[in-house]
Image: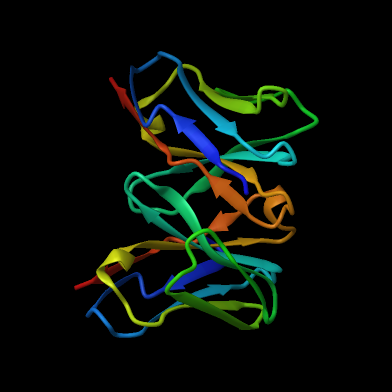
Amino acid sequence: DAGITQSPRHKVTETGTPVTLRCHQTENHRYMYWYRQDPGHGLRLIHYSYGVKDTDKGEVSDGYSVSRSKTEDFLLTLESATSSQTSVYFCAISGEGANYGYTFGSGTRLTVV
Amino acid sequence: GENVEQHPSTLSVQEGDSAVIKCTYSDSASNYFPWYKQELGKGPQLIIDIRSNVGEKKDQRIAVTLNKTAKHFSLHITETQPEDSAVYFCAASNQAGTALIFGKGTTLSVSS
């Protein structure tokens, strides 16, 4: 989607290795989010950020950490990847928080073998 | 925290029929309820939303209704077309208005 890009689009990694996914926006939006999408579970919130260096945990944050050192980039790190973290990861942005909707990125498909 | 339940999980209709997807939420403080459509291989896209001070909103063939007393909201698609086939997600804002909590999704199939 315009203004938000995720990288990489696909990644295969081995169990136990660290992995970092990147979300980059050009909209200067304050809020950024990481969700994971799994069959039967829908979209579940991992972490979100409401400003540079300001982050908070979502409902499935265990095993994940995030960093936001500048407005345009929000990084998601799997500290030691496990097979249960095989998923499609979506980043989203919002200018005014949840009450004004999100724009989603195209997703990163991560496979942990 | 907020919990959003969505039904049905799958829905198959004939082209031209109507489709209805229903969601319930748990936190009475939620005041924003968007619906997203996700096509295969893409990220979800916002199609319509409603705020707690409004009971119904329409946009061409799509409408959303909200019943705050019962804490449920619904998506109505009329005159369905094959291109409406997708996964649809409802969501509700958390109490702080900082994040959206999503339902598990409904896979809509429209056959011609």
At 54% across and 30% down in the image, what residue appears?
Answer: B23
**Rendered view: B57 above or below B101:** above
At 19% across and 73% down in the image, what residue appears?
Answer: A113
Please state, as top left, top right, bottom left or bottom right, where the C terminus of chain B lies in the image: top left
Q: Which sits in the foreground, A44 or A70?
A: A44
Residue B59 visible from this viewpoint: no
Colour scheme of this structure image? rainbow
Q: Which sits in the foreground, B27 or A28?
A: B27
**Rendered view: A15 above or below B29:** below
At 64% across and 55% down in the image, what residue appears?
Answer: B99
In the rendered image, the residue lying farthest to the left is A113
Q: Which sits in the foreground, B109 or A62?
A: A62
What number of labels is visible? 0
| Residue A85 falls in image quadrant | bottom left
In the rendered image, the residue lying farthest to the right is B53
Residue B21 visible from this viewpoint: yes
| Residue A20 falls in image quadrant | bottom left
The x and y percentages for residue B29 are 75, 41
**Rendered view: A74 above or below A4:** below
The reply, left or right, for residue A77 in relation to residue B10 is: right
The x and y percentages for residue A36 are 42, 59
At 74% across and 39% down in the image, what residue appears?
Answer: B31
The x and y percentages for residue A71 are 67, 78
The x and y percentages for residue A10 are 30, 70
